Every structure is written in C-alpha cells, then in structure tokens.
Image: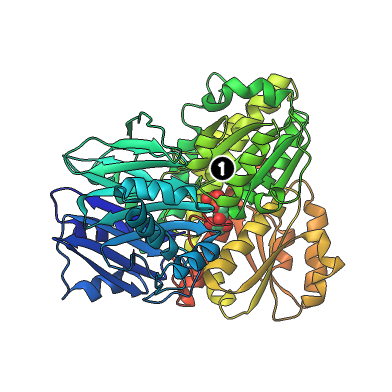
Amino acid sequence: MCGIIGYVGNKEAYPVLLQGLHRLEYRGYDSAGVALIQDDIINIHKRQGKVSELEEYCIDRDISGHTGIAHTRWATHGEPNDVNAHPHFSSDKKMALIHNGIIENYQLLKTELINRGHEFASETDTEVLVHLVDDIKRNENVELAEAVRLALTQVVGTYAIIVISVEDPHTLVVARKGSPLIIGFGQNEFYVASDGSAIVEYTDKVVYLNDEEIAILTEGDDIHVKTIKNKVIPHYVETLEMSLNQLEKSGYEHFMLKEIFEQPRSIADSMRGRLNSAKEIVSLGGIIEYENHLLNARRIIIVACGTSYHAGLVAEYMLEDLVRIPVEVEYASEFRYRNPIIYSDDVVIAISQSGETADTLAAVELAKQKGATVLGICNVVGSSIARATHAGSYTHAGPEIGVASTKAFTAQVTVLTLMALCLAKRKGKIAKQKYTHIIHELENIPKRVEEIFKLDTHIKEIASYIKNFNNALYLGRNYNYPVALEGALKLKEISYIHAEGYPAAEMKHGPIALIDEDMPVVVIATIKGTYDKVVSNIQEVKSRKGKIISIVTEGDTVVKGLSDYIIEIPETEEMFVPLLATIPLQLLAYHVAIMRGKNVDQPRNLAKSVTVE
Ligand code: F6R
C-alpha cells in the first residue's frame, strides 16, 4: 500500500525517482507525485492516476534537482485526487514529506495544528506529519532530523516516511514503524525505497531500517541511525539479493502471465538445497533450530491473509494427515482481534508473500507476546514478518509483481510440504515407502506443471465461454477445497466476475439455490480421496442445469461425461493436486480478465502489499 522512494546525491533525481515509481506501482496506483529541491525552493508535481500520467504531466515542468522524493498512492484517508496525492508541503512550502502507512491519531493532531494556525490542503492523515514536523522545528528551534524524531513521538500508527527541506537541501530524513523501508548506498549518494525493486539497478548495498528508527542521509556523509527514543545505534549493511531481470516482463504481456509460467522454476527453487531425493533427505535450514518446538507443539496455528491463507489451508490438511499435530488456520485479521488462546507450546506459522501484510505482522507480534514460537514463510527477503518471527524459511519464488498472487502460492505450498515431510519423518509418522514415493513425486511437480501449460489454448476457449457470465461457483473437497477458494479469488480479483469457492458438499446447505443455466460451476474433481462424493455433487449441479467446468485427472471418463468442459491435469499424489490444479485456474482467470479488457497486473482497488489493516 503506497510506494515511496527518495534520492540524494549528484545525479539528477527525477529519472531515478520516476523509474522507482514504476517499479513500486504494484503497491498502489491511484495517484502519484514527486518533490524536488532546486536551490531554495521545492517543486512538487502530483497527479491523480497512474505513474505514466504523472510522467506525462511532468514533460513540460521543472524536474531538475539532485534531492527528491516520490510516492505512488493507494488511498486510505481522502479520495484519490491531485490534492490528496503525496508529497505534502509544510505551510511555507519549504519542507515536503511522503508517507506509507496510517496515522491513527491524525484528527487530534490536526485539530491542535489548526488551532496553532496551520492550514491544511488535503484530507489525508499524512499531511499532519509535515505540519507537525514544521511546527516543532520552528517552535523548538531544532534541526530537521530532531524535529522529525520529536514529531514521531506524538504519532500513533504506522509509517515509512521521507522528509526533505530546503534548509538541508542535501539530506533525506527517513523513519519507519510498521511499513517497510530500505536504504541503498551509492557513490556519496543514498537511495531510499519501500522495497529493493526500486533501487536494485543502482546498488546492492542496503540497510533495512527497523521499526521506530530514524536515519539521516546526507550526500557525501555516512548514514546516521537513531531510535525515536534518541539512542544512536549501529547499522548493518547487507547485500540485496535481487536481479534486475527478475523485475522485467521478459517478453510476456503481463507480469501475472510471466509469473504463472515461472512456476516450474519457482517451485524447483523453493525445493533447491532442501530436498535431496537421491539420499531421501528433506531439511529446511531456516527452521532446523525450531524443529523440536514443532514436533512437541500442542498445536500449530497458521495465520495469513488472502492467497497465503489458502496455502495455509492446504498445509493444514497435509500437516494433520502426515504429522498428526492439530492445526488451526486463521485469517490474521480475525486472529489478532479476537483475544485468541495461545499457549507457550503452540507454534504459530505466519505465511506472507510480501512479508509486510499489516494484519499478519500484528498476529505475529501478538503470538510472540503470548509466548508462542513464531515461524515465518515469506517470499520477500528481509521483510518485516521475516524479521519479526523467531525463524523461518523463504519461498524463493523471486519477486512477484502482478497484484494477483500466483507463483507465491505454489512456492508456499511447496515449502509447507517440505516442512510436513521433515516433521513426519522425524516423528516417525510416515512409512518409509510412502515417504520415498512422496519425495520423488514432489521432485516431479515442476515437470507436471510444464505439461499443464500445453493446455493454455484450451483454457483460453473455456475463458471465452466464462467471460460472459456475471457469477461463478468453484467447488472442491479435501485438498481441493482450498484450490476452489483460490480459483474463485483469482477470478473475482482480476476479472470482477463475482465468484465464490465452496466445499462441494456444503453446496446443498444454501448455494445450490443459485444454480441455473447462468451459473458456471468449476469443480476440482481429481481422482482419489472424495472423488465419488464429488461426482455426486456434480450430478446435483447438472440436474439443476448448471454449467460444469471440471478439473480432472488425465484419462478420467466419468466426470468428462458429466461436464461441459474439462481440463485434464497429470495424475499425482492427492496432497500435490493443489500444486497442479491451481495452475489452470490461474490461467483461466487471467484469460477471462484479458477478454473482459481488465488490467490484470493492477486490478482496481487493490495493491500488492497490504501494509494497512
Ligand atoms: C490475492 C492476493 C492477496 C494476498 C494477500 C496476502 O491474489 O494477492 O489475497 O495473498 O493480500 O498477501 P501476503 O501474502 O503478501 O501477506
């Protein structure tokens, strides 16, 4: 939610900022703006709409300057328009600020500032910050960084901010709490951004700022970091593990399509070094230290949101089946506010692609406070959740830029499978023969995914059928229930067709009333497990004239006979069906959205990294 970028150094700042905004646009895209210091003035240009609209607007404007900040917004307080776009000015226009997060006590602060004569231009919570810093700077007669620090002691909420002032024209003051912020080092210059994608082409030497820390970045000087409580602290320079070509579309029309097609590679990368099929060894280095906590856990509680929550549901089935430890899966947003019972011998696993989802991060903090062991399964290296958890394993899916999550889901399921296999083996809950079979089958999953891609043209035909409906139902049972949820989520979020995922047997407790000839029903009906039951559920839909699109195991004839369309996927172990069956559903949603003329990479109202609750 919102992307921020700043630059100070001897380059022209605008091209750096603009390129950074393009890379951060997945975080929010309802308005964008830039502020540049030029001598003793700050020029701000901002525009409702996408970064490209800002770019066009800036063509005949003064964009010179070596110090600047820029922002791409996902609106929380105040509708998306030119005025509410960031950066925001202080009253005298000598200071400007950008912000990602939410200032919860902004109304109170705003009233006090208005009483002291400040005039506000926007409806945003952010604007209070720049007025507050300015007010403190004047009244306390302190330096910019100290004014920022004092202002932040009064703030309740979350923030990643960058402040510039004409009085310190070669300095950026940055701070964070609950929203991500990364600082990159160049030649006598600094880059600051919400994530590494915006700065990787300039540097791989970075510092991840921690919560409640402020950094002062002056051209030609060293970085100075202190806490909001004014304690000077050392900084640790790390290497940014990201390459530029991971951030390009590489010939694909959309990031989402590229990311779908990357899955053989991303699944394999998530197994690499962790699965040795020749020696039949599965190990997850990141959590080895906590393996005994997992083995002796009273319960495993998985917290996540959206697609990551669906990966958690798959893990619940797997962990209970293979390891025989009770597992609960919770929406992080519900978990954190419902006073959950958490025991110190519970293990909480937070799953998050971005590692920044505010609700998941808050659930992690809550579980830690209650004394549980907390592990993370994150994709973004160095992200807040990865750092807040006691230990964890990265998914190695590579940067996911399309707003709809695809390769992150299959990578999460892969890592959770490895975890389940490790624990099952250590706990002695899995027969040798089954273990051997499963790990060989897992190793073959990337190949099986490749096979599914051959069905793309056929899936496109099905998409051209579905695109004209207003609703769709997705049904599955057991391991295929989370797949149904995920398939429905993909369709609704990018094509705006209303879609619901249901456990197939629940249909007759209500949703069956919806079924008529205008209701396409996507059923995941692979062989094994509850196959016969699902066949009965398909019969129930068919006898009410519902249109049936089935995902079946290659060679299936029974479901084929009942379906209007089928998608055949290779046979695999039941627990791995989610890794295969999700792929055609991702492609289906993609093609439907394209045929309906939607922006698949940046669907309306969404943002990739949900850093507000
Ligand atoms: C759906 C989607 C979202 C995310 C959710 C959690 O396609 O992308 O539902 O899965 O916002 O995000 P992370 O995994 O970053 O915590």
Task: Name the residue at 17% across, 48% down.
Answer: 9
Query: Is 56 positioned to the left or the right of 390 in the image?
Result: left
Horizontal and vertical percent position of residue 70 = 30, 60
Q: How many marks?
A: 1
Residue 35 image-quadrant placement: bottom left
Confirm whether residue 584 shows in the render. Answer: no
Horizontal and vertical percent position of residue 594 = 46, 72
Mark 1, residues whose alpha carbon is within 10 Å: few (<14), some, or many (≥20)? many
Task: Name the residue at 16% across, 76% down.
Answer: 60
The amino acid on which the numbered mark 1 sits, given as a three-letter code, is Gln
Q: Mark 1 vs ligand 1: CB under 8 Å?
A: yes
For the residue pair 402 and 268, the one nearer the viewer reads as 402
Task: Name the residue at 56% across, 67% down.
Answer: 493
Confirm whether residue 520 shows in the render. Answer: yes
For the residue pair 240 and 105, the one nearer the viewer reads as 105
* Disc 1 secondary structure class: helix
Query: Is 428 positioned to the left or the right of 496 in the image?
Result: right
- Ligand 1 placement by image quarter: bottom right
Query: Is 120 positioned to the left or the right of 516 in the image?
Result: left
Q: Which residue carries the number 1 mark?
A: 412
Horizontal and vertical percent position of residue 428 = 74, 20
Horizontal and vertical percent position of residue 111 = 51, 68
For the residue pair 410 and 604, the one nearer the viewer reads as 604
Q: Tell me the quarter of the image containing the C terminus.
A: bottom right
Residue 118 image-quadrant placement: bottom left
